[in-house]
Amino acid sequence: MFDVAIIGAGAVGAFVARDLSRYRINVVLIDKELEVSEGTTKANSAIIHAGYDCVPGTLKAKLNVQGNKMFDRICDELDVPFKRIGSLVIALSKEQLDIINELYERGRANGVPGLEVIGRERLKELEPNVNEDATGALYAKTAGIISPYELALACAENAVTNGVTLKLDTEVKDIEIKKGGFIIKTSREDIETRYIVNATGLFADVINRMLKGDEFSINPRKGEYCLFDKNDGHLVNHVLFQVPTPRGKGVLVTPTVHGNLLIGPNSVNVDIKEDVSTTGNGLEYIVNCARKTMNKFSMRDVITSFAGLRASTSGGDFIINVPVQGAVNAAAIDSPGLSSSPAISEMVVQMLKEQGLKLIEKDYYNPVRKRQIRFADMSDSEREKAIEKNPLYGRVICRCETVTEGEIVDAIKRPAGARTVDGVKRRLRAGMGRCQGGFCMPKVVEILSRELGIPYMDIVKDKKGGYLFTGRIKDNYTKGDGDANA
């Protein structure tokens, strides 16, 4: 029997797993997908918000500000790229300046440090490429940018290294509540546990129903994005927001932590919890909105578009509660969920403790995790030594991002290692360059097949059923009328 079962391996679930791995308890992290961070965590704005936007007195306001302060230490421990570049909410009219002042007062009430309302001249110093219509801005120095999936992967790796059991490809079908614990019935096995954490993002309402908690509904809200290559990453220095609306923080323009430019999202309610399709109308909307902030980007530099889903509720706040003795819901974690995730985790652990979970620290807990050595970041002499030690570092697989075969093999063999093509991409950026995997994808499949002992055609892009190949060309040709020996 496990002491704690965490359902959902996104940012919140992975943080809870890492925090609980500090103690002498048996913890299991469960997810229905083949990789960590395959749900809401993998596709969002990748912003660590300062916390001025949240309504004072809400969980969002409290946990955003608390969480923001934790990222420097956490990213240092986990070796995750994080840049505290600051954000600007741009006013494009005198009327919007009034809203900027309201946001400033709200931020002060929430305890956000370092907020300033700046005028047009100061704004142009900070952002020379911002549109001429801009009249001023709210400057939040504590905002930052990060890679959300790298953060979740790092937490999961660190948790596994400290003793947490990771069960992927394990879908929860039902939960039996019994005296002193639970039996989680999954697609693979029954898992007995004393405590449960529900961190299942878009499906938190489903797990809550299994736990007999007070009813709530998760309403998926889709946001579409355009990602530009690194030629455009220099166009802005900060995260540039427009004045927020009731539906969200508006379309942003921001550099990414890896040097690309990102614009988006829109905000569209959808019925299907796995609808991550992009639309022509949606992308046209975000481009037109982004041009109101800054119009120097070129659409010829867009390398991909994508969509993510927010786990929203009609109440508007996070739902962090106890549905039944022994369980904790971490639900409705939409924006600023990523920014709040480490503080949410601390709150969840405290709630487990208050329900009787005994937490005695391990002597051997290690909070430090080092990311893989990146060939692209090495000096020439370091590259020579790496190739001498392992010739696979001499075979470049992804030309755009300079990722070698040695790195891909390492990524597969690490704790919570890669199992899919997108799993390799999110760990190493293979396929994230200008050609978007046009050159390296077949080679990544070949390496995954070889190292995992899985047939070539059974390797998937991201999810179960996401096959990249439907058959061998020669086999199909043989079944037809052609000459198989041609």
Image (cartoon, rainbow, N blue to C red):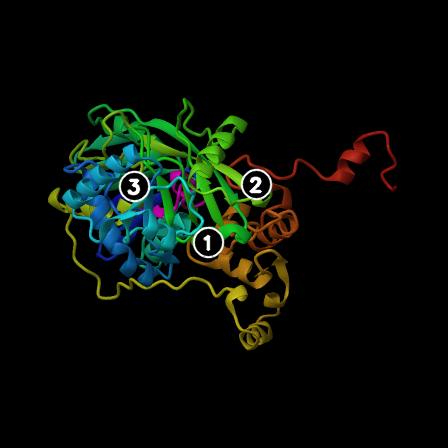
User: Distance of mark 3 from mark 1, alpha carbons?
Assistant: 25 Å
Q: Is residue 244 magenta?
A: no
The residue at which mark 1 appears reads as 417
When asked about the image quadrant of residue 190, the answer is top left
Query: Does the residue at mark 3 contact the one at mark 1 (Cβ under 8 Å)?
Result: no
Q: Amino acid at mark 3?
A: Gly
> Which residues lie in the magenta part?
35-48
Q: Provide the secondary structure element on which disc 3 rests.
A: helix
Determine which of the numbered discs, if any, sits on residue 4 in the image: none
**Residue visible at 35% across and 55% down?**
85
Q: From this viewpoint, is residue 61 visible?
A: yes
Which label lies toward us, 3 or 1? 3
Quadrant for the N terminus in the image: top left
When asked about the image quadrant of residue 61, the answer is top left
**Residue visible at 22% across and 53% down?**
114
Q: Is the residue marked by circle 2 packed among few (<14), some (14-19), or many (20+) residues within 10 Å?
A: few
Q: Tell me: 280 left or right of 190.
A: right
Q: Position of residue 314 (x, y in %)?
A: 26, 24
Earlier sequence position, callout 2 versus callout 3: 2
In terms of secondary structure, what is the magenta stretch mainly?
loop
Which label lies toward us, 2 or 3? 2
Q: Amino acid at mark 2?
A: Met
User: Distance of mark 2 from mark 1, alpha carbons?
Assistant: 35 Å
Q: Provide the secondary structure element on which disc 1 rests.
A: loop
Q: Provide the secondary structure element on which disc 2 rests.
A: helix
> Between residues 376 and 413, which one lies in front from this camera angle?
376
Q: From this viewpoint, is residue 34 visible?
A: no
The residue at which mark 2 appears reads as 299
Determine which of the numbered discs, if any, sits on residue 337 in the image: 3
Earlier sequence position, callout 3 versus callout 1: 3
Q: Tell me: 300 left or right of 194.
A: right
Q: Position of residue 91 (x, y in %)?
A: 33, 39
